[in-house]
Every structure is written in structure tokens, then in C-alpha cells.
Image: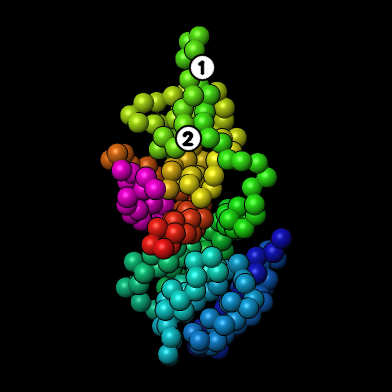
Amino acid sequence: MNIRVVIVDDEPLARLAVKVRLAQRAAFELVGEFGDGDSAYEGIVALKPDLVFVDVEMPGKSGLDMLAALPPAQRPMAILLTAYEGFALQAFELAALDYLLKPVDDERFDEALDRAQQAFPYRCQSRAAAQAAPVAPALRSFSVRVGSRTVLVPVADVERIEADGDYASLHANGKIWLVRERLHNLATQLDPRQFHRVHRSSIVRLDMITELRSLTNRDAMLRLRDGSVLRASRSYMPALTEALQHLNTKTDS
């Protein structure tokens, strides 16, 4: 499935440069281009692209304002284009995939497209999980063998889950329980509105996250309520940030 792209830039030559580069990658399909923030907002709502290249500074509504105005559920993956370095924080707050300084060289542009291709499957999974009704009820408790006993650990008590070889370790109320099941299998049984995979080796309950700090390689460090710190891989960041936005919206309402 192709990644549908929209380009937003008030400079026609800048839009052309992006189009020429996109044409060299078969996985990307250009579906629209806009020269200002207002028309881009309406176009994105109508076209529902997967990825948008956005010039940060434009006359009228800026690229950042346009993205921020979109409801989180309708906000595509974004790669920001700018001649200045001072917008990194806003880019991170909007879960931008990348932040390219003009003039953009071919290697950095290709790196940004690679990042979009890596994040795209997780974005699709996140949207599908949010929109589709669950086929089966989410898991309510884990069955854990402790010697000759079987202990039921409520899912509501679990704060995070980490891979442990072919097994997984549950962290709940200061205790660690070993479950004889792979992390990937557990991820499919949990409610995606409450739990999210942040790394190939860890799952976190969303309401346990108290701080998210970006790193230079576009990974992030997560601080949890119990003080523990986990690394979030950049491949999972777009879907994680979207899930956190949905959680905050629900909490605010």
C-alpha cells in the first residue's frame, strides 16, 4: 500500500524539489499540494493523506499552526521543512517524523522518507485499532505460574511489560511476574487505548507516562510514575504520541 503524500509550501520551486525526489520512490504517491496553511488544512481534511511535507513559515497560517489545528486523529505523519533551527520543540510536540533544514540534501531527504516507511505500518495499526470494534474483549488478567500455584494478576495493576527472552515480565505494584508468552502475543491481547508498545522489548500503560523527552537520534526517553525510565524507539513514536494525545483529550473532556 502506497504512502499518500501532500506537500505544503508557499514556494513553487520548493514544492517542485520535493515532487522530483518523491517521484524516485515508488512507495510514495503525491495526492495534493498547497501553497498556504488555510487551503492545506481543508485539503488534508478532505484527502486524508498519510504523510505531509510542511514548510514551517508561510504567509498567514504557518505550517505549525495548520498542523496543530488538525484534530489528532486526522493529523498525518509530518516532515517539517524550514530554513531555521528554532522549531525543534514544536516539531516534537506535534510528533513530526523529521525536521529538515533548507536547503535539504538528498541523503537527509532519503533518510526522512525511510523513517516515514518505518513508521507507516504502526500508524496504520494504531488507526485501525482506534476505529474498529475489538473482535474479542481485551485481556482482564494474566495467569502466572508460581511454583505449583497459579496467580491471577489484574491487567489494571500492570504498569509495564518487558521482553525476557521467549517470556515477558509484568511489572505491577512493585512486583515482577514472569509470563510464559512472547511480548508480541501479549501486545495483541491488550486494549490499545490503555497500553502501547514503545520499543520492540517493552509495552507501557499510557497513564503511567509522566514525561517524554526527545533524544538527538529521534528516539525518546519516557519517565514513569514510579520513577523508572524507558527508551522509546523512534519507529513507535508517531503512534505513541497519537495515543497519548487521544488519552489527554479523553482526560480533559
Residue 153 location in percent, x, y? 46, 27
Q: 113 and 93: which one is in front?
A: 93
Disc 1 is placed on an element classified as strand
Q: Are marks 2 and 1 in contact (CB under 8 Å)?
A: no
Please state which amino acid type lies under the numbered disc 2.
Val
Which numbered disc covers residue 47? none
Amino acid found under the numbered disc labelled 1: Thr
Residue furthest to the top in view is: 148
Where is 118 relative to 230, above or below? below
Q: Residue at x 52, y 28 (%)?
A: 142
Which of the colour schemes (rainbow, by chain, secondary structure, one colour) is used? rainbow
Residue 238 placement, left or right of 86: right
Residue at mark 1: 150
* Structural crowding at the residue carrying mark 1, measured as other residues with C-alpha within 10 Å and reported as few (<14), some (14–19) or many (≥20): few
Residue drawn where x is 47% and y is 15% of the image:
146
Q: Is residue 181 above or below residue 96?
A: above
- Say whether residue 250 is visible: yes
What is the span of residues highlighted in magenta in the rendered image? 207-225
Q: Residues within 10 Å of mark 2 (few under 14, many from 20)?
A: some
Q: Secondary structure at mark 2?
A: helix
Indicate which disc, 2 or 1, sits on the residue closer to the N terminus.
1
Q: How many marks?
A: 2
Report the residue marked by disc 2: 155
Q: CA distance from mark 2 to mark 1?
A: 15 Å
